[in-house]
Amino acid sequence: MNPLRISLLLAWAASANALVRTPQFTSRYHARNNVFGPRLSDSMLTLSSSSFYEPTGCDGKVVLITGGTSGLGRESARRLSGAGARVIITARDVEKGEKTVDLAKQNNWNPSTPIEYVVMNLNDQQSIKAGVADLKSKLDGTSTKIDVLMNNAGVMAIPERTETKDGFEAQFGINHLSHFALTGLIMNDGLLNLNAKIISLSSSAHSIASAKGGVDFSDIQSERGYDAWKAYGASKLCNLLFATELQRRYGGKNKITSTAVHPGVVRTDLARYIFGTTTEESESSEKDDTNPISKFLKNTAMRAVALFIKDVESGADSQVWLASGGADKEGTDVAGKYIVDMKPVAPSEGGTGETAAQNLWKISEALTGVEY
Ligand SMILES: NC(=O)c1ccc[n+]([C@@H]2O[C@H](COP(=O)([O-])OP(=O)(O)OC[C@H]3O[C@@H](n4cnc5c(N)ncnc54)[C@H](OP(=O)(O)O)[C@@H]3O)[C@@H](O)[C@H]2O)c1
């Protein structure tokens, strides 16, 4: 690992620390199963003990998870499938879909209801439409319906401004617009069940945009100036606004429940644009690294980061809890709410109101051409 990577790693640790210092955040870090782990003792890494939320009673439920091929999406797929749900994930391509299906088989996630996938590149609106058509055929037209839509896929802090196939700034396009379009297409096609749950992965990073008064509607695609974190924060505020507006429009008795989630700062592949590698790749390069100084620096950096982040199992708790009806069982009202550590909390102030949410909805309809 070169010095630049190490400094990026430390900067990420510091930003992770800053992000989790929200008033609502309850510390529940647990790094025992962390991939940094084997060389580090449990006592060093465990700031407080925690158990993972184990979902139950998902038999017969149909769950669609975007970005189910890694990180929080894959962990949610594993747990919900294990609790009996029929889980369909979206994968960027056939290879990634097959790899996850194989992993699920090898690890016996749910032998009676194997994981399925539909190909959807969220970088491309046509691919989303084709994926929805494929989904429809998997659901036998509209005879089977989706009980849980987990809008989970995302990208973080792409260093240079890049565009999706449709010409949208990539973080806004992939994190928000793709999910806006997907949800609309699914709803317009009548694929959602009564009482369906729609879970949108936001982030405490929405506060980066909130601190500046909210989404900059005059430059929503960062055409005048691009900052990787600002664009990420804005896209995560969009996820939050989308979740609340969806609830306002379609929520209610026998209708959908829409919720936004901050999972915590979690060790997944999300930081791949900062580090330039996935966790799998960095683990393999770690094995090949024979330079003792580089190894020492990397271990030190890893230890610093590990103090501030969750492992993927506890990171996925809130979304698994929501998807499996944990909130219903506990009588917690989560409709239109922002959830951290399985509790509704207030999002950051600034640009989180109804006017902004409605404005975003109109812009999203105009850009994607999906109206609902
Ligand atoms: N990890 C955290 O600390 C953290 C904190 C706050 C919020 N979140 C949110 O949690 C969500 C899940 O992130 P994660 O941490 O699990 O990251 P991750 O491990 O990188 O997973 C992201 C998933 O999104 C998929 N994806 C990205 N771009 C795509 C595209 N163009 N088309 C199709 N799929 C695409 C990825 O597929 P590929 O593998 O094919 O790229 C992957 O399956 C994100 O929305 C993120 O913003 C995470």
Image (spheres, rainbow, N blue to C red):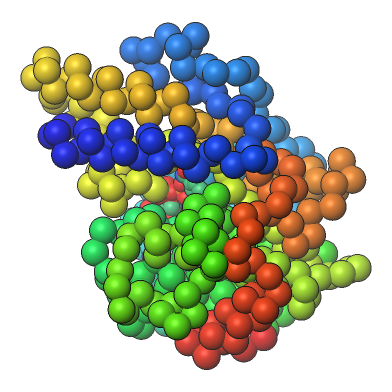
Image location of residue 265, percent across then percent down: 49, 39
In this rendering, the answer to whether 34 lies above or below 77 is above
x and y, in percent, of residue 224 in the image: 31, 79
* Extreme residue toward the left, this view: 291
Q: Which quadrant of the figure has residue 264?
A: top right
Q: Is residue 97 visible?
A: no
Residue pictured at 30% horizontal, 33% vertical: 10
Residues 51 and 12: in front is 12
Residue depicted at 64% across the width and 75% down the height: 357
Q: Quadrant of residue 297?
A: top left
Image position of 40 with respect to 236: above or below? above
Q: Quadrant of the N terminus?
A: top left
Q: Say left or right for 168 vs 116.
A: left
Give the image quarter of residue 347: bottom right
253 vs 204, left or right, is right
Q: Give coordinates of residue 5: x percent, y percent.
A: 20, 38
Q: Is residue 313 above or below residue 85?
A: above
Q: Please provide percent x and percent y for residue 36.
A: 36, 24
Pick the quarter of the image with the C terminus.
bottom right
Residue for point 39% across, 19% down: 37
Viewer-side residue, 149 vs 359:
359
Is residue 38 in view from this perspective?
A: yes
**Which residue is at 61% across, 28% downward?**
27
> How many tags in the picture?
0
